[in-house]
Image: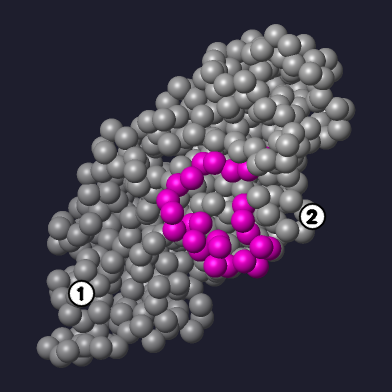
Amino acid sequence: MLLELLGVEGPDDSPTLRTAWSTGVDLRTPLGHGESGEPVELDLAAHCVCVGMPGSGKSELVRTVVTGLAVRNSPELVNFLLAGTADGLAALPHVATVARDADQLTDLLDDEIRHRIRLRDSGDIGKAPVLVVVVDEIGEASTRKPLLADSLLRAAQLGDDLRLHLLLTGRTTPSGAMRGLYAFAPCRIALPSATPATDGQILGVPDVAPLPALPGNGYLKSDFTRPPRRFELARVPEGMLARLGELMSVHGNRARPLWPPLGTVTYDVVRERNEGGEIPFALPEEFYSPLELDFADEPHLLVFGERRTGRTSVLRTVLCGIRERYTVAEAVVIVADPRRQLLGLVEPERLLAYASNPAELRTIVSDAVTSIRKRLGQDWHGPDLFFVVDDYDAIPTEADELQPLLELLPYGKQIGLRFIAAGTEAMATKPIVAALEDAPALRLTGKELPGTAPGGRPGLPAVGFAEYVGKPVLVPWHQNSGEPA
């Protein structure tokens, strides 16, 4: 059994697990036993290709290798991108993403390579965990999807520099676009195939003894210089992965989801990646962790963008962030929303008022200003008041119902007043916006991705391209579900 070869007494052996995880990255893992009963180890420091006919044990081999590496490495140090047979492996906290098909795998891999190249060029590649890309039954996918073969070849070529390692399985030796990849995989595994000649071809040796036609019997050739070694695969018992996943999740953080392809950046992705205590709202290009809004430090935010570039989506992110970051005793909200696109995002007990027309807004602002003025000159410790305004440019400047706030905004930090407004560049002519020229500004660039946004809404932008304090960022798509999300 695999755990015995790893020196683990069972799926509840916490001390051994903690010791293994404290030793740094180790890409060696037992495959099974050799002909004399000795352990046979795979070292994934080199890319590896495994070939075998259907039923030869390729998927079981993947389970063994991934589980072994997970036992020996923490999720902070080694992550997995899986495609093909996940086979219960998603229970392990090391699994960043399970690609649903060849197209998604190509997108994920291309984007991750771009991201890691930026980290390498900035000297920060050491901050990225080792990523092991495991693709079960690669041959058919790469034949139908030549772009995937190109992506894998690039990953193989840059693997050492970018901390990327490949484990690929297939039914036949690589051909066509995959043959170039074969040259970058000195580690070979042959499982039972149609003929010994096929085994010899994958191993690079002319004559090998036939393998028994039983799943899990195989040859391992570690590199181009060593002879192949026979082994019998050490299996992972049913049900063990779930238990191991529970134990490992207690001792380490889950792997971050991979950098998502453009067009699929959702608020959940940004929230999952957030490591700080403030409100996450955008993904910068050069780092995994999102940018945060700290309204105690910068009390106001201006969002500029044309129609359909995602500015209302930004306000949804801010409102959800307020709900998650602050208790009702710490923050309350007033919303001005002519198109009623922000309904349902604020809890009733937190929502002081919701205005969708000028008359409502005029009354609300008048009452709010009267109350807020009482905070001037005192050390305010009550709840912050967030004014969240969508389509501010649609309010005529000569009849701006928000104008009474102007005298109070400079004291926002001291009196707990926060102002967030979104609109086109036309709102820059308003006195309030002019007075907030030093406030952080997010400018959506107007680029719009084709296709369908997350949630199945055709014709809407899936992601907002933007600049924040002069740097390019991705603003997440935040669908209006009508309920807190």
Residue sitting at x 35%, y 64%: 276
- Residue at 40% across, 73% down: 325
Taking depth in this image into account, of 321 and 438 the one nearest to the observer is: 321
Instruction: Provide residue 147's location: percent of width, then percent of height.
Output: 57, 21
Q: Where is residue 393 in the image (x, y as percent from the top left)?
A: 32, 54
| Residue 87 in view | yes
Residue 23 is a magenta residue: yes
Write the residue at 45% across / 47% down: 25
Instruction: Between label 2 and label 1, give the one nearer the viewer.
Output: 2
Q: Distance between the residues labelled 2 and 1?
A: 59 Å
Return the residue nearer the eye: 206 or 49: 206
197, above or below 419, in the image: above
Secondary element under disc 2, as helix, strand or loop, is loop
Q: What residue type is labelled 1?
A: Gly
Does residue 466 appear in the picture of this structure?
no
Q: Where's the C terminus, which quadrant?
A: bottom right
Q: Residue 188 sits in which quadrant?
A: top right
- Most extreme residue toward the right, as rendered? 213
The residue wearing badge 1 is 412
Q: Is residue 216 above or below residue 334?
A: above
Residue that carries the numbered disc 2 in the rendered image: 238
Q: Which amino acid does label 2 sit on?
A: Glu
Q: Give the range drawn in magenta.
A: 6-31
Where residue 367 sits in the image (x, y, percent)?
Answer: 31, 84
Q: Does the magenta stretch include residue 86?
A: no
Name which quarter of the figure residue 459 lies in: top right
Q: Earlier in the sequence, mark 2 or mark 1?
A: 2
Residue 150 left/right relative to 305: right
